[in-house]
Amino acid sequence: MKIALMDSGIGLLAAAAAVRRLRPDADLVLSSDPDGMPWGPRTPEDLTGRALAVAEAAAAHRPDALIVACNTASVHALPALRALLEPGIPVIGTVPAIKPAASGGGPVAIWATPATTGSPYQRGLIEQFASGVPVTEVPCPGLADAVQYADEQAIDETIAAAAALTPRDVRAVVLGCTHYELVAERIRAAVQQSGLPPLVLHGSAGAVAAQALRRAGARTGAEAATVAPGLTVLLSGREEPLPRTALTYAEGRMLAAVSPAL
């Protein structure tokens, strides 16, 4: 079993780690675009071109499914990616976990990039899945970049700025960018209010990993393989080691620990 994941940067680590937990014997292909990131400020046409190139690099390794582990790319490029690769390779997009967050009744905050916050796409999801639930859209300028480069000071500052915009009575936070899942506990610590019930964070990594395995025809919980599963890292099409910044995060260290190539 081989699962590929694509993103502009290391935001794909959360979903990759989720795949590894569900299917420990699966080979992984991580295809990102450090030469072209960030994708958020790009035009939809430019972003789609970059995403197609990253997907083609991953597809050359003949995966059983491809996860688009990027909210922005899923919004703008998913139809083009599916037209390119399906039905040969199932393509699974990433959708902010607004529906499960709203099922608890709220109030809910959605942390997302400035490009996604207030977008027709996100507003449509709110109307569809969170009608009648108090929802606050929280822009998080600079947070994805801070996570990408493991800039500890910038991570602290951008999380604090977003937390200041988050209502104190929020019971659930949707992590609307895959990079944010890598610092989920730091977000929880910044938003959790003393004396209130534990804050619930909603990411997308687990759901997209499970969906990718379903689409690939895999069963989860497989026994560990007798040889360590492979990890192929593609940086703007070049096969290279896992970026050093990825090892800053538990997900990256977990992937590196069981991959013989590293």
Image: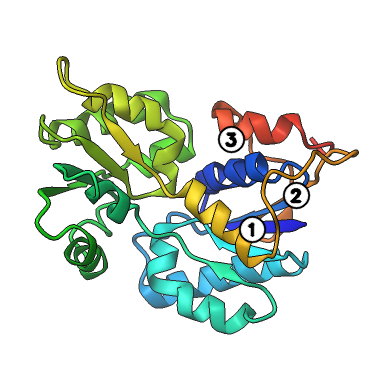
> Hey, which quadrant is residue 229 in on the image?
top right
Q: Nearer the viewer, mark 3 or mark 1?
A: 1
Please report contact status of discs 1 and 2: CB closer than 8 Å, yes or no. yes
Instruction: For marks 3 and 1, give the CA distance.
Output: 24 Å
Could one spot residue 102 in this view of the protein? yes
Outermost bottom residue:
83
Is 181 on the left-hand or right-hand side of 165? Answer: right
> Hey, which quadrant is residue 35 in on the image?
bottom right
Instruction: For marks 1 and 2, give the CA distance.
Output: 10 Å
- Tell me if mark 2 has few (under 14), some (14-19) or many (20+) residues whose alpha carbon lies within 10 angstroms of its own: many
Disc 2 target residue: 26
- Label 2 is placed on what type of residue? Ala
Q: Earlier in the sequence, mark 3 or mark 1?
A: 1
Q: Earlier in the sequence, mark 2 or mark 3?
A: 2
Residue 246 shows which numbered tag? 3
Disc 1 target residue: 213
Instruction: Indicate the position of residue 15 as horizontal and vertical percent values.
Output: 55, 47
Please report contact status of discs 2 and 3: CB closer than 8 Å, yes or no. no
> Which residue sits at x=39%, y=72%?
76
Instruction: For marks 2 and 3, give the CA distance.
Output: 20 Å
- Label 1 is placed on what type of residue? Leu
Q: Earlier in the sequence, mark 1 or mark 2?
A: 2
Instruction: Indicate the position of residue 21 as horizontal and vertical percent values.
Output: 64, 39
